[in-house]
Amino acid sequence: MRSNYILFWITAFLLLACEKEVKLDLPEFQQKIVVDGRIEPGMPPIVVLTRSQDLYAPTDINALQNNFVKNAIITVDDGTNEVVLDEFCMNNLQPELIPVIAAAIGVSEETLQQLNFCAYSTFDPNFFGQVGKTYGLTIEVEGSTYTSSTKIIDPPVLDSVYFKLNGELEEHGFGWILINDNPTVYNTYFLEMRRIHQNSAGEPADSRFLPAFGPVFDDEFFNGLVFDFGFGNMGSYEDNDIPDEFKGYFKTGDTVVVRISSMDYAAYEFMKIKYIQDSNGGNPFASPANAPTNIQGGALGAWVGFSPLLDTLACYPQ
């Protein structure tokens, strides 16, 4: 017994003697311009410029307002002609642009209107997106120039959308899309949805399109096949009308607009990693993933050409 006691203290002494102070030499934070730009058929280009934030920087409303980058010169070209985008701020922003910009940066319209927000766009219909065109982007700001390019490819082909009850529930289930994938084309997909029936306040249940869980995918594993993809009610997590046990489900009688978009490969790579990072939610055990960018010149973010197809899902069992 005595020998075990002595062995314990010898081991403890050795462990303590081996302790060494570890100093991490972390690289100094370098602020960069972040580009959030999009263009799609029949819609004007929208570009939002912000600055990257230090992990330990404040995130209150004033910090967000001061994060927008103003006075940039932004040019969009379609290979033949070009236009310089106008800077629009919330105090002079056209009402029809508010939902577009809110969707572009992934916030609600209410949040957008609370910010001293500025974005860049144009009302020139010649530069509203068209399928098949490639759009170049040039940004001149604070002595630097950034460039990018994206193509609006053909929209995806969607066979059908349908609703299927969860086997354990009588009135709740998931939405499903049926894709008949083209075997001769590499396809990318971005899935969003928006409930348009009224909530208890008489407003649309979802104020904007919301991405599905794992919304960005390609046809690597189902090229040329007929493929079913299920999706849940992401808006339910923000909806106080829905009891906790039914979060994630659509209810019989819901009406949902399903939006599924194609994009070129560079945009797809950015969007895929972006939503992987979002789903990790700061999980320390998740694999790190640096979001790629299709912006040249040292900026972050992406310039994305979306090509959407929309369909309406009436949530009634087949």
Image (cartoon, rainbow, N blue to C red):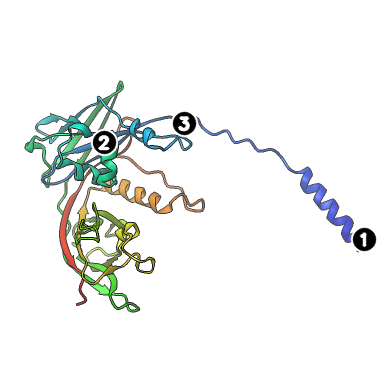
Quickly name the residue at label 1.
2
Distance from the alpha carbon under mark 3 to that under mark 2: 22 Å
Please tell me the numbered disc located at residue 318: none
Query: What residue sits 27% from the left and 60% below the top?
Result: 219
Of the two numbered discs 1 and 2 on the same chain, state the one appearing first in sequence: 1
Residue type at mark 1? Arg
Could you classify mark 2 by the number of other residues whose Cα lies within 10 Å: few (under 14), some (14-19), or many (20 or more)?
many
What residue is at 41 percent from the left and 43 percent from the top?
Answer: 290
Q: Tell me, yes or no, whether the two marked residues, 3 and 2, touch with CB atoms within 8 Å.
A: no
Amino acid type shown at disc 3: Phe
Disc 1 from disc 2: Cα separation: 72 Å
Q: Is residue 176 left or right of residue 276?
A: left
Secondary structure at badge 1 equals helix
The numbered disc on residue 48 is 2
Q: Earlier in the sequence, mark 3 or mark 1?
A: 1
Q: Quadrant of residue 89?
A: top left
Distance between the alpha carbons at the discs numbered 3 and 1: 55 Å
User: Quadrant location of residue 199?
Assistant: bottom left
| Camera-side mark, 3 or 2 | 2
Q: How many marks?
A: 3
Q: Which residue is mark 3?
A: 29
Question: Relative to residue 41, is residue 183 depicted above or below?
Answer: below
Name the one closer to the observer, 284 or 221.
284
Residue 204 image point, x, y percent: 21, 57
Q: Residue furthest top?
A: 143
The first of marks 3 and 2 along the sequence is: 3
| Amino acid type at mark 2 | Val
